[in-house]
Image (cartoon, helix red, strand yellow):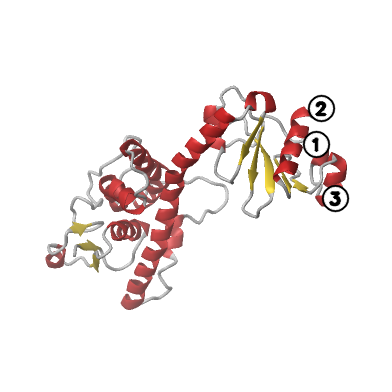
């Protein structure tokens, strides 16, 4: 059995996620929360304490190329991220893809935690933001004693395991989704129809924007998790609300029979007032709505 140490007392997202990461790799990993130097010497992994390889409290911090300094969690992910991916997602066997997933998790997720723990402000907003680091801090009860803090720490670790898994899974799944969407773009005559039909709801925007550089696809039709079907506009670029082509303006805000009467298509459910998505009870109905939208002339 391996033994890991983090500091005792008040905890933060850094040490919580560091333990969550390592326990996900080593199921029998024993965790000790201490600053006792003699106990630290008995541990195989020491993070966020002890001034060692996975501590970040030195004056001369280790920094990424973008200047964001590592904290204990980031340092652990740097060395054990691929091991975590192998342990939790054995279906992803390509080393290059594993490395890309590890890098994305660091860039999109871990760097925010590292920055916060190092006192680097990367969050700017005109309204108050409760960050993940703030949420982890809520696991410490107000006025808690040592035993309550200890219990709160391990409750936070279990929470963190789920978050880390789901975030990593999102990037792992993207490779399968990418291959599926690429195959459908090649199979379907999107140059003529301007419609891409997917049999299930998967994140598709980034992939379509990357692969459909000629902007042939105006609408994507897919089955929603409820079993109904959606027709959604393709944005002009990543993180943009502007669409390559909006749905017909007269559809906006209509539902059910009102929308079916206007379109002449049965089983319509809704059209969002912002004209970026509409729904139908059937696949055929959603495709018909997409076809009408393609032919619609924009005022």
* Secondary element at tag 3: helix
In the foreground, 281 or 149:
281
In the rendered view, does 68 fall on the left or right side of 122?
Answer: left
Residue to which mark 3 is pinned:
257
Q: Which mark is residue 145?
A: none
Q: Position of residue 68 (x, y in %)?
A: 35, 41
Mark toward the viewer: 2 or 3: 3
Camera-side residue: 275 or 261?
261
Whether 222 is drawn above or below 225: the answer is above
Q: Is residue 234 above or below residue 34?
A: above
Question: Does residue 48 sit above or below 295 in this rendering?
Answer: below
SS type, badge 1: helix
Question: Which residue in the protein does label 1 denote?
Answer: 249
Whichever of callouts 2 and 3 sits on the residue coming sooner in the sequence is 3
The residue shown at (72%, 38%) is 287
The CA span between labels 1 and 3 is 17 Å
Q: Residues within 10 Å of mark 3 (few under 14, many from 20)?
A: some
- For the N terminus, the image quarter is bottom left
Residue position marked by numbered label 2 in the rendering: 299
Mark-to-mark CA distance, 2 and 3: 25 Å
CB-based contact (under 8 Å), mark 1 and mark 2: yes
Residue in view at x 37 percent, y 50 percent: 89
Q: Is residue 194 visible?
A: yes
């Amino acid at each position: 059995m391996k033994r890991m140490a983090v500091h005792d007392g008040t905890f933060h997202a850094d040490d919580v996620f560091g333990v969550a990461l390592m326990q996900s790799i080593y199921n029998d990993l024993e965790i000790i929360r201490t600053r006792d130097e003699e106990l630290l010497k008995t541990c195989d992994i020491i993070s966020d304490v002890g001034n060692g390889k996975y501590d970040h409290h030195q004056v001369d911090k280790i920094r990424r190329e973008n200047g964001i300094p590592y904290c204990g969690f980031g340092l652990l992910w740097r060395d054990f991220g691929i091991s975590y991916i192998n342990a939790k997602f054995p279906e992803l066997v390509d080393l290059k893809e594993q490395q890309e997933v590890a890098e994305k998790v660091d860039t999109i997720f871990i760097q925010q935690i590292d920055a916060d723990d190092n006192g680097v402000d990367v969050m700017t907003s005109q309204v108050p933001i409760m960050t993940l680091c703030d949420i982890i801090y809520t696991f410490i009860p107000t006025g808690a004693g040592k035993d309550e803090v200890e219990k709160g720490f391990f409750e936070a670790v279990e929470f963190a395991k789920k978050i880390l898994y789901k975030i990593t899974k999102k990037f792992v799944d993207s490779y399968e989704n990418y291959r599926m969407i690429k195959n459908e773009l090649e199979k379907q005559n999107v140059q003529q129809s301007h419609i891409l039909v997917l049999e299930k709801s998967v994140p598709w925007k980034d992939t379509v924007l990357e692969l459909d550089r000629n902007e042939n696809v105006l609408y994507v039709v897919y089955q929603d998790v409820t079993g109904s079907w959606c027709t959604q506009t393709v944005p002009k670029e990543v993180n943009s609300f502007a669409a390559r082509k909006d749905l017909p303006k007269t559809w906006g805000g209509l539902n059910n029979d009102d929308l079916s009467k206007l379109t002449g298509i049965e089983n319509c459910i809704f059209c969002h007032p912002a004209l970026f998505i509409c729904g139908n009870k059937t696949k055929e109905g959603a495709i018909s709505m997409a076809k009408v939208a393609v032919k619609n002339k924009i005022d």
